[in-house]
Image (spheres, rainbow, N blue to C red):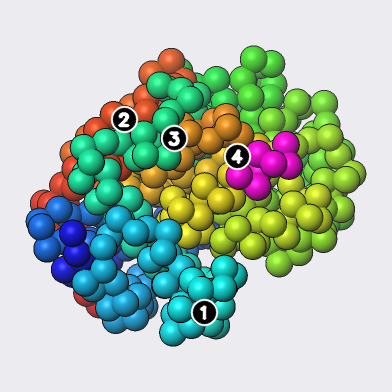
Amino acid sequence: MKIKSVSATWLHVPIPKEKQHISDFGPTTSFDATLVRIETECGIVGHGEAKSAVGSNSVNLALCALIEKELGPQLIGQDPRDISRLWDVMYNGTRAHFALDRGHVFPALGRRGLTISGIAGIDLALWDILGKSLNAPIWRLLGGRRHERMPAYASGGWAPAEGIAAELQRFIDVGDFKAVKMRVGSGDGEVRHSIARVRAAREGLGDDIDIMCDAHGTMNVPEAKRFCREVADCNIAWFEEPVTADDKRGLAEIRASTDIPIATGESEFTRFDFRDLIELRAADILQPDLAIAGGITEAMRIEALASAHQLRFAAHLWTGALAFAAGLHVSAVASSAFILEYSLGANPLLRELSVEDFVAVDGYIEIPERPGLGVTINEDFVKRYARTA
């Protein structure tokens, strides 16, 4: 089996104004991602997903070019089932032979950012091919699932204090969720407004619903400490990205000051970033985005670190259907995984890119048994939203 071609398509899906929400990223006018397609000489096709931004809106032209002109050509003629070796080939570039011979990495400049995102999208497609070639779901190839279904939390929460409980309750009702995540931070203006919104959410939802809070890295250390202190009696399930990913020591300082679990990782790349978080004792919950952090291959390495350090793993799944499915497969296998993110914002890439649907029932999502990622691409959707400029 040999790789015949590697292509990348920017999917740009406009969001109708009535379905847009506003956060610190601005209005969600579109949902964007890069669709990776790898075709083998024997006719098996695998798909993956890469992202040039953590949030919804992004321009993916540079990422598509990187995949098609730099990473993809290195793989032509290679066996797509040699996934670990191909990951190292892409990460180390012209020095891959040193890395493969000597057992340690020799990366070039692109060891963060779009290069790793491109590797992630290709990696997902390679795993998809492997699963299809063996007629097995990826979780089977990773060692077998620990759960046939997993609990999920509804992810959204942008309304002001007077409306936040009602908004979150609507999200909860979609799949009878027992947990929900709301956004806090700079979008609220001042920390006191974030505190008021959290208190309003807890009062409105009662004590039996877990509430996660996500600041998108927009607070500074004193603000985050104050927030934790003032919501300490609200039984927050976790506080996500209190400060920028550039301030890992600040994050460690926040974690040391509170017993609210600290979650982070959606803005990080590779196991090396997560190793640094762990060594600094900066997080309780690791949240790699599989479309950014290096794909399934790297996510399993990150999860191994989490497990070895008695931390928890909760993949960032504000994604399209392919990366979401990848997160399901990894989480089903991972000993430290405990919950799934389920986007309740307007996200056509999650709900329309795939012929199959991912439905939450009684707060749980079933782990698919279909071969590979278990995603059948809606080609009409791709044709409608493919963008070249």
Task: Classify 165 as above or below 156.
Answer: above
The residue beneath circle 3 is 143
CA–CA distance between discs 2 and 3?
A: 15 Å
Q: Are marks 1 and 3 in contact (CB under 8 Å)?
A: no
CA–CA distance between discs 2 and 1?
A: 39 Å
CA neighbours of label 4 inside 10 A, class few (<14), some (14 to 19), many (20+): many
Magenta region: 304-310
The residue beneath circle 1 is 98
Q: Are marks 4 and 2 in contact (CB under 8 Å)?
A: no
The answer to whether residue 235 is magenta is no
Residue 334 in percent (x, y) is at 53, 35
* Type of the residue with mark 2: Pro
CA–CA distance between discs 1 and 4?
A: 32 Å
Upstream in sequence: badge 1 or badge 4: 1
CA neighbours of label 1 inside 10 A, class few (<14), some (14 to 19), many (20+): few
Q: Are marks 1 and 4 in contact (CB under 8 Å)?
A: no
Q: Are marks 2 and 1 in contact (CB under 8 Å)?
A: no
At 27% from the left and 49% from the top, the residue drawn is 130
The residue beneath circle 4 is 313
Pick the front one: 233 or 89: 89
CA–CA distance between discs 4 and 3?
A: 17 Å
The residue beneath circle 2 is 368
Residue 50 in percent (x, y) is at 38, 61
Pick the front one: 111 or 365: 111
Q: Secondary structure at mark 2?
A: loop
At 64% from the left and 62% from the top, the residue drawn is 272
At 21% from the left and 72% from the top, the residue drawn is 77
The answer to whether residue 307 is magenta is yes
Residue 19 seen in the figure: no
* Type of the residue with mark 3: Gly
Foreground tag (4 vs 3): 3
Upstream in sequence: badge 1 or badge 3: 1
